Amino acid sequence: MIKKVSFFLLFAVLLGGCKKDQVGPLNGSVDDAAFNEYEKHFLDEFWKLNPDWGTSEGYHKYDSILLIPDKKYREKLVNFAKVQLDSLGRYTPASFLQTNKMDYAIIQNQMNYTQWQIQQLKQYEWDPSAYNVIGSFAYILNEHYAPLAKRLNSFYEKMANVPAYYKEAEKDLKNPVVELTNLAIDQHLGGLSVFEGDFADSLKKTNIPEATKKLMLDRAKLSADAVRAYTEFLKNLKNDHPRSFRLGKDLYEEKFKFEIQSSKTAQQIFNAAVERKGFIHHEMAKLSVKLWPKYFGKTPMPADTLDLIGRMIDTLSATHVKPGEFQSAIVNQLPKLNAFVTQKDLFTLDPTKPLEVRKEPGYMAGVVGASMSSPGPYDAGQNAYFNVGSLAGWSPEKAESYLREYNQYVLQILCIHEAIPGHYVQLVYANKAPSMIKSVFGSTATVEGWAVYSEQMMLDNGFGDNSPEMWLMWYKWNLRSVCNTILDYSVHCLNMPKQTAMTLLTREAFQQQAEADGKWKRVSVSSVQLTSYYTGYKEITDLREDWKSKAGDQYKLKNFNEKFLSYGNSPVKLIRDAMMAREVPVKH
Ligand code: ZN
Ligand code: ZN
């Protein structure tokens, strides 16, 4: 108790000390106030230029607008970024409150990223899937943020530009990547129902006059035609010299810098991941040797270590719930996680914000077994939901394979990752000190890294009774993040052939063939994103170790967790600057 009090006192004193020298008065300086005004103005201008993005963040002022992605538009974006960078140059962020310092760095990164994307990456020339209006229309149709008639009207007005939008796309594409061309065709054909069926179904539920309905349906038909014509265009495109789907080292490093916002380079993270893989294999082998007699008695152990681990994982995967009990198993897990977190004093959980579990809404069905739906930053008052899919209607083989993957052990890890104390707890803390900039442009590495970090933190504190089974399955799960990083970097920067990639996933990461196939598909149509889990996990874990040695005997895990989460989705490197800036020893 005494320890805890002195810890807080120490920080209170230091905070006061810091404030005087570095960050002005408690509520921010005149500069801070001016910067906060600037931020508001910046965001409104930003949404005007990125209305689709705004819609998905819950900013609905420009829902009815679809901008044509032409050269003029791109010039506007580049110019906007230049103006913002000039504006930022007029401030002295060193004098800002910590939170504003972070916002400043995040906006600056975002504006440099915008310029780089248009001037260097030029995805608009080679990625046909970069053009897609369907997601935005589906969002307007499916999310109940406004009355249906109002949303349908935005939908209708926004459709006016759909044909021109795709005409422009056809004009700008040059030697596109084949994999991305096929992806674009699949996504557009798969999404056609939004214009061909869903919109009409929704119209029926309103009392919009028949004549108006007819106009609206005619326009939906034109939109569907435009989407279909785009897929035909892509199918018939003469493309003798397509660009490779591999991004190449130079573009990759730059993209990693802007998107992951890590203090390390992609190559450094890759090297760390390779090392981590070796460590995990070593730990898994020790656990498997320990578990072998319990499950296999006197049967001789396979001589090959990876075979040994594979056999153990295969055996443990057989312990899983029945298809009909998948949802209830997840629901039952949550109070246990709550109780554990409280008992071990890892966080103070806000009892007024209970997590709502719901059956996965129809339009998400079949995508994932469980996921979090977080309200956009502009709807922060709305509920967060833990969506749980049902396996009803699945073939027995498909259900069995899925349930083996999400076996008794992994199911618990999944609940930690998605809910407590993973994504859901993080969201509750982030909403306590809402920052639009951090929510919208923050780092996915922080969000995913936190969820992965929280799995290990729970196990370190004895969740799952420290059983070797639980640890072995967690290592397999953690190995997935690690191998995602290795795979992404190797494929995009080191020309790793498909066959080598498959061996990495199936043999070294113990994945089923179907999972490995899916991962190969993902790495051939995306880059950098797959590294976010491991990068964030590593940076958070490293930060905690450094913070711990600095705090010495004042260290308390709960304080680290809560302090870290108080910075929202800021990149870990900025959180590190803030957390390590406070000198612990007070010298007189
Ligand atoms: Zn089974
Ligand atoms: Zn996640």
Image (cartoon, rainbow, N blue to C red):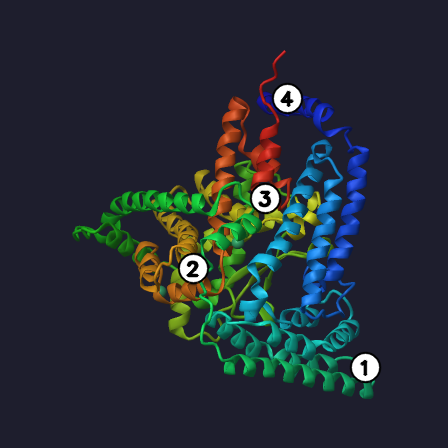
Q: Residue at x 59, y 51 (%)?
A: 424
Tell me the residue that label 2 is attached to: 406
Where residue 10 is drawn, which disc sits there?
Answer: 4
Q: How far apart are marks 3 and 2 (CA)?
A: 30 Å
Q: Quadrant of the N terminus?
A: top right
Q: Which mark sits nearer the N-terminus, 2 or 4?
A: 4
Q: Nearer the viewer, mark 2 or mark 4?
A: 4
| Residue 59 in picture, x, y percent from top left | 74, 60
Query: In what element is the residue under mark 4?
Result: helix
Query: In what element is the residue under mark 3?
Result: loop
| Residue 256 in picture, x, y percent from top left | 52, 50
In the image, ligand 1 is in what quadrant?
bottom left
Tell me the residue that label 1 is attached to: 207
Determine contact: label 2, label 1, CB under 8 Å.
no
Q: Count neighbours of disc 1 (C-alpha within 10 A) and say few if under 14, some if 14 to 19, many if 20 or more.
A: few
Determine contact: label 1, label 4, CB under 8 Å.
no
The answer to which image quadrant residue 76 occupies is bottom right
The answer to which image quadrant residue 121 occupies is bottom right
Q: In this view, does 458 lie to the left or right of 27?
A: left
Q: Which mark sits nearer the N-terminus, 3 or 2?
A: 2
Q: How far apart are marks 2 and 1 (CA)?
A: 45 Å
Q: Which mark sits nearer the N-terminus, 2 or 1?
A: 1
Q: Is residue 18 left or right of residue 296?
A: right
Tell me the residue that label 3 is attached to: 571
Q: Nearer the viewer, mark 3 or mark 2?
A: 3
Q: What residue type is labelled 3?
A: Pro
Q: What residue type is labelled 4?
A: Leu
Q: Which mark sits nearer the N-terminus, 3 or 1?
A: 1
